[in-house]
Amino acid sequence: MPEISRDEVAHLADLARIDLDDAELDHLAPQLAVILESVASIASVEGLDEVPPTSHPIPVTNVFRDDVVVPGLTAEQALSGAPAREGQRFSVPRILGDEQ
Amino acid sequence: MTDWIKKTAAELADALAAGEVTSVELTQAHLDRIAAVDGDATAGIHAFLHVDAEGALAQAAASDERRAAGAPLHPLDGVPIAVKDVLTTQGLPTTCGSKILEGWVPPYDATVVRRIKAAGLPILGKTNMDEFAMGSSTEHSAYGPTRNPWDQTRIPGGSGGGSAAAVASYEAPLAIGTDTGGSIRQPGAVTGTVGMKPTYGAVSRYGLVALANSLDQAGPVTRTVLDAALLQELIGGHDPLDSTSVDQPLPSLVDAARQGATGDLTGVRIGVITELSGDGWQPGVMARFQESVDLLVKAGAEVVEVSCPTFVHALATYYLILPAECSSNLAKFDAMRYGLRVVPDAAKNGGLPSAEDVMKATRDAGFGDEVKRRIILGTYALSSGYYDAYYGQAQKVRTLISRDFAAAFEKVDVLVSPTAPTTAFELGEKLDDPLAMYLNDLATIPANLAGTPGISVPAGLADEDGLPVGFQVLAPALADDRCYRVGAALEALLAAEWGGPLLAQAPAVEEIR
């Protein structure tokens, strides 16, 4: 049975780009440990060596359509929910670190 | 004066066709009801996050004009409907019950919404839900919970508690829900209404803000089985915009519902799922379930017990696959293109905040606890070193669950169980015990994992608490008609015993206006 420590939860939150504060870590880490302990029972299911995985409930193979142009969103529509914009572009915070 | 809000959608369609009422009158009657009982986060049913009175009345007026010109678009043209706030609506806010999408107005319609508009149904508004459809109580909505019309101290189920409560409290005759692990069926069960999860792919997911792509399915939330069949036929069918959409016709659902309503199930083979009973199942739920099974036997059905041994692992399978898919899906809420953007005062190192700093601050401020729990759990399940032991293992067990269904459907036409192990619990009771909350989905989850259809119909009231119990009917993929036939039969047999629908026994919802 895997343990999940407060530090691990902090690391996972970092990977998931969620800035949890100390109080949230104290609150969520023990809850996640309980959930994980329950779902970890899956590891005990035996006889799965020959069983194929299912990623999708209905068998889907490549789905194609004719390569024809259809109308999409206008730039105005696409930008309509933008938190910040500059002309016809999304305006975003700096994406490079200090050293880059 | 006719009490239009108590009528079924099929009755309203007939009344519109006969010229007994106009769509504007119907729509206004429902808007008045919403104004009287819906309230807000602090009091009332709170089924709606957004009511579009002006838009609905304009659509109703257009419907009346079409009808006057002898050209209605569809039998349900003019019958009002409510839509769960997880489906995009052009020009109407779509929040998914989350702060991260507060105020967002989508630039396009979901296919389901487009089909509703194309058939002329006025959209009353958007219904409340657990944030991004994660939950079984609607308490995880960032905008406050919905209350159960039977007892406002109780949960209305989730995630689609808003749609179910709207229909149960006569705020809307029809609603759209979505079901990833039971979010249509369990709210139906605990509010005494009908909820149908169609076969995976039978209703387009285009414009449905994804929780877990391989599990999500939109479907009808109604007061009768026939209304659900009418609505699924309207919203279902192949959609080129959804590559997982099924490109083959289903048997007629409305015919199946009408056939079932005769109450004759001669020759229908029904399997009671052994694994979905026992410890933890409320006695009053099991009693109503057993009585319903007995009625089906009297109606001519042949009932046997069927074991689906892998179902005992369904909950663990689901709570690995779902968080894995959701952690990936919700990565799109990155504060860059739409939705909330929270800019911290400074980066951790004191410099100007970077895009990553903004993402982290936004996602912390914009997501609630349950969403954070599931994203972190999914991130864990997909981490290298754990992937094979958890996510990979869950995908294999998922195959076994599908095989259990396949083996069962060799022997029987439909499988049945109670929809949920208990009746509606108290608001707040399980809010900080996520595992207890998850257990509520025990009976509904297998159908999502296997992509099979399932319906919940009211089975009566539990003796302990006088609250509604749901009866679930599961069928093979693409045999949605069987859910409607057996569901309609049970509905008709029970209505004959009760002298009317179960909702007629509900206490009057207090008007708070």
Image (cartoon, coloured by chain):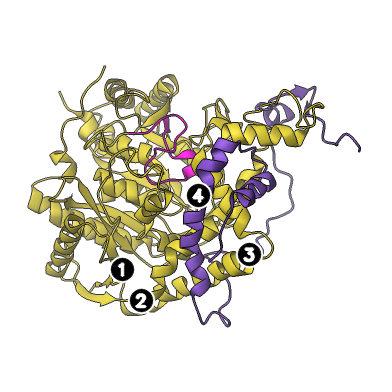
Give the residue at mark 3: B386
Position of B471 with respect to B331 (left or right) is left
Q: Amino acid at mark 1?
A: Leu
Of the numbered discs in the image, which one, if any, rests on residue A30? 4
Q: Residue B302 lies in magenta, yes or no?
A: no
- Spatial separation of the CA atoms under disc 1 and disc 4: 37 Å
**Image spot of residue B28 (x, y percent):** 31, 22
Q: Secondary structure at mark 4?
A: helix
Q: Considering the image in quadrants, where does the N terminus of chain B appear?
A: top left
Give the residue at mark 1: B415
Q: Secondary structure at mark 3?
A: loop
- Spatial separation of the CA atoms under disc 3 and disc 4: 19 Å
Discs 3 and 2 lie in a common subunit: yes
> B119 or B372: nearer the eye?
B372
Of the numbered discs in the image, which one, if any, rests on residue B408? 2
Q: Secondary structure at mark 2?
A: helix
Q: Which label lies toward us, 2 or 4?
A: 4
Q: Which residues are magenta?
A: B123-146
For marks 1 and 2 on the same chain, the one whose residue lies earlier in the sequence: 2
Q: Colour of chain A?
A: purple
Q: Which label lies toward us, 1 or 3?
A: 3
Q: Which label lies toward us, 1 or 4?
A: 4
**Is residue B242 in view from this perspective?**
no
Badge 2: chain ID: B
**Image spot of residue B439 (x, y percent):** 37, 56
- Spatial separation of the CA atoms under disc 2 and disc 4: 39 Å
> B251 or A26: nearer the eye?
A26
Q: Amino acid at mark 2?
A: Ala
- Spatial separation of the CA atoms under disc 3 and disc 2: 33 Å
